[in-house]
Amino acid sequence: MTTRPFVLALAVASFAALAGAHTPQQTRPSSSFPALNVDAIAKALGRPGQMTGDVYKVSFPRTDLDVSVGGVRVRPGLALGSWAAFRAGANGAAADGDLVLTEGEVNPVISALQQGGFEITALHNHLLHEVPRVMYVHFWGRGDGATLARGLRNALSRTKTPLAAAATPATQPAPGFDAAKIQRAIGLKGTVNGGVLSLSRARPEPVAMMGVELPPSMGMATSINIQDAGGGTIAATGDFVLTGDEVNLVAAALRTHGIDVTALHNHMIHGSPELYFMHFWAHDTPDRVAAGLKAALDRTAGAR
């Protein structure tokens, strides 16, 4: 299999998804498998998503939450974006995703996901010192896409997540920082939505879970989100997708540049290769944050 090219992923809670852009009709084929019925999935979820290659991704930003970290009010696109991704497979569809939850929502959602045919692959924090505390549940399922979507919708109904698609904003908020300069400094090109700059870089090798190949748009890409934090500073968070050999190299690069490591864990069960996800938090000037993130990226396989 050829090495995957670098790809740009949408912010986990991008306003492009809120805008409701998606492929009409029914299908986009994946390999030789029957195509996804994306209209049925969108109908079951109550909002449309977007096609990225052969992956249909739907976002549910937690716009109901007012979360702050160290005095920085976190935009939904920075770290509060629930999402689900669907890809055609041998058994109809494979789906994975990540739900942003309050502590009280965690176990009702886990029960509902299990009732809907999903497995739980991770539960953990992504941030530190956030107020109020938020947790992240990662899930996995295989079966009919629309049936899985209905199960996910039922799980989301146990939360205060806004389920209806939001109206498209007349204008996008300005990021409040020089997004082009940061992209040049880090060495990645991204998109700005909802005032958040989102960058990503895919793993160079194929990634699979439970025998199903997962493209970068199904959460298998290093993700960096950046927003204005006032006073000439920015806040950045996200996660590096790493092999075991890369974990401490990246951690050292982040800490050397004053960037906090906030979590290290798995997002998958029976993943191949075994990957680790290192979450981070940076709050500093754009030049310093960009330098630290570039140094960390340079210690991953995608840079070599």
Image (tube, helix red, strand yellow):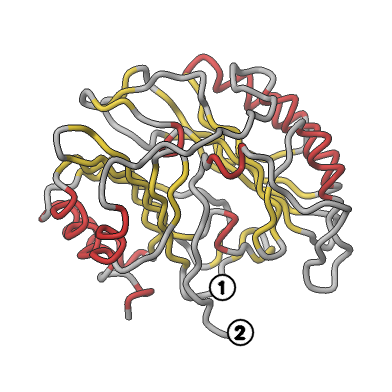
Instruction: Point out residue 128 in the picture as x, y percentages from the top left corner.
Output: 28, 31
N-term mark: 1 or 2:
2
Q: Is residue 234 left or right of residue 276?
A: left
Locate the N terminus by quadrant: bottom right
Cα–Cα gap, marks 1 and 2: 8 Å
Circle 2 sits on which residue? 1
The quadrant in which residue 40 appears is top right
Q: Secondary structure at mark 2?
A: loop
Residue at position x 23%, y 60% from top? 248
Are the residues tagged 1 and 2 within 8 Å (C-beta)? Answer: yes
Amino acid type indicated by mark 2? Met
Which residue is rendered at x = 72% and y = 46% of the image? 141
Give the numbered dot on residue 232: none
Give the labeled residue for mark 1.
Answer: 206
Dot 1 falls on a residue whose secondary structure is loop
The x and y percentages for residue 126 are 38, 37
> Compared to 69, does 96 lie above or below?
below
